[in-house]
Amino acid sequence: MRNLLKEVSMNETNVKWENSIKRKYDLYSRNNDIRSEFERDYTRVLYSKAYKRLKHKTQVFYSPENDHICTRIEHISHVESISYTIANYLGLNVELTKAIATAHDIGHSPFGHKGESILSEISKRDIGESFWHEKNGLDFVDKIELLEDNEGNLKNLNLTYAVRDGIISHCGEIDENNLKPREDYIDLNEYKTSNQYAPYTWEGCVVKIADKISYLGRDMEDAITLGILDEHLDELYMMLNYTKDKVINNTILINEFIYDLCQNSSIENGLCFSSDMFNLINKIKKFNYENIYLSKRMAPSIEYFNIVINQIYNLLKSTYCGENTLKEINFLEKTYPKTINNFKKWIQNYWNLERNERCKNSIIVNMNDEKSYYKAIIYYISGMTDNFAIETYNEIIKF
């Protein structure tokens, strides 16, 4: 039945509405702006450079020759489409799901989850905290990404609470059924680990589930295309209970997942699959981990990612010298002109030394605190595309 969740949709009648549309500070206004608060969030993300770079970031398979293998930005499009279908059927706010889905992976590093793991190892060693892309996404929209306002000032994205919450709460690695939003309006900086809290809105819950629906089927389809699952096709057909004449593709799987979810969800039960479908989803996830993500075919690229990221990080880290860091940066620029110049132009927007007068964002790098400098380097690397990281590495190693 359609519109089963309409009464809990995030709109003006919802008791969480005022909290959900809160921003850290007021956005500039126009007399002719016809967008809602969540539509403004969507376009602010869409116009951001961090979003644009996602087309050149790995989803699962690095630098495939086949143009039809999924990239990070295509994954986002799938999540947006799936969450729209679910929210529209259940009567939820599709503008909110669109904004969350479009922004949900904005904090992803180059080289997919492997790049994320490498940055996390560096962060834990040098800063004492984990790096995870959901938290990095929140930091990007709150502190890093800059948009020009109507007076030419560069400011952070300043999204609504509901969208910011959806970003940090979206972890698709969920193993629970019956997903419902939390009631508490919390400071999102309270998040210490991925998947620590449920999303604040039903729409955030939809995107969280759409993320999982999206990657399970698409990763499998891509792996079949690339021949990675050639030795496991019989097992796959048996697991899906498909006959050999039935096609295994993302379209079929997504439709089955969405239909089952929409038929079994309710306000009382939360967003949930049938027991049979939920068991199948967990089997697919286990199958993908064993035969795709942990495949021997992936090992050489992982070693390469580790070398690339660590070389970039170590070079930039070596420039730290307290308030004399800029001098060190300028000295090193002679040897690595592109690498250092790009980093210098970026970090000058965020530190308490010489700054661009147009920048009205918060200072996040105190040059008397080396850990804040190291964290800024991690932010910088996490924003790189795969190709930019490799170009940077190649300049570092050449003579």
Image (cartoon, rainbow, N blue to C red):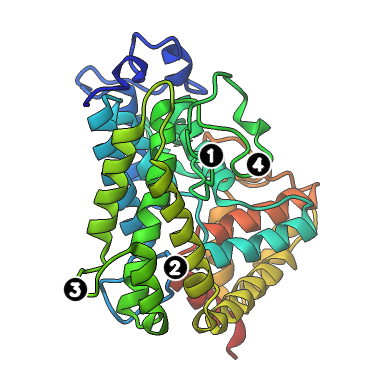
From this view, report whether residue 155 is shown above or below residue 368.
above
Q: Amino acid at mark 4?
A: Ile
Q: Nearer the viewer, residue 114 or 43?
A: 114
The residue lying at 51 percent from left, 63 percent from top is 286
Q: Left or right: 296 with respect to 117?
A: left
Is label 4 in a helix, a strand or a loop? loop
Is label 2 in a helix, a strand or a loop? loop
Give the mark nearer the N terminus: 2 vs 3.
2
Q: Are marks 4 and 2 in contact (CB under 8 Å)?
A: no
| Residue 100: percent from left, percent from top | 39, 37
Disc on res. 364? 4
From this view, report whether residue 253 is shown above or below residue 317.
above
Disc on res. 168? 1
Disc on res. 60? 2
Give the mark nearer the N terminus: 4 vs 2.
2
Give the mark count.
Answer: 4
| Residue 54: percent from left, percent from top | 39, 58
Kindly report which numbered mark, 3 or 1, lies closer to the viewer in this rendering: 3
Mark 2 and mark 1: span between their CA atoms? 21 Å
Q: Left or right: 220 with respect to 30?
A: right
Q: Nearer the viewer, residue 243 or 90?
A: 243
Density class for disc 3 (Cα within 10 Å; few <14, some 14-19, many ≥20) is few
Mark 1 and mark 4: span between their CA atoms? 19 Å
Give the mark nearer the N terminus: 4 vs 3.
3
Spot the residue most to the bottom.
Answer: 399
From this view, report whether residue 383 is shown above or below residue 236.
above
The residue lying at 47 percent from left, 73 percent from top is 292
| Residue 142: percent from left, percent from top | 53, 36
Location of residue 11 by image quarter? top left
Density class for disc 1 (Cα within 10 Å; few <14, some 14-19, many ≥20) is many
Residue, disc 3: 245
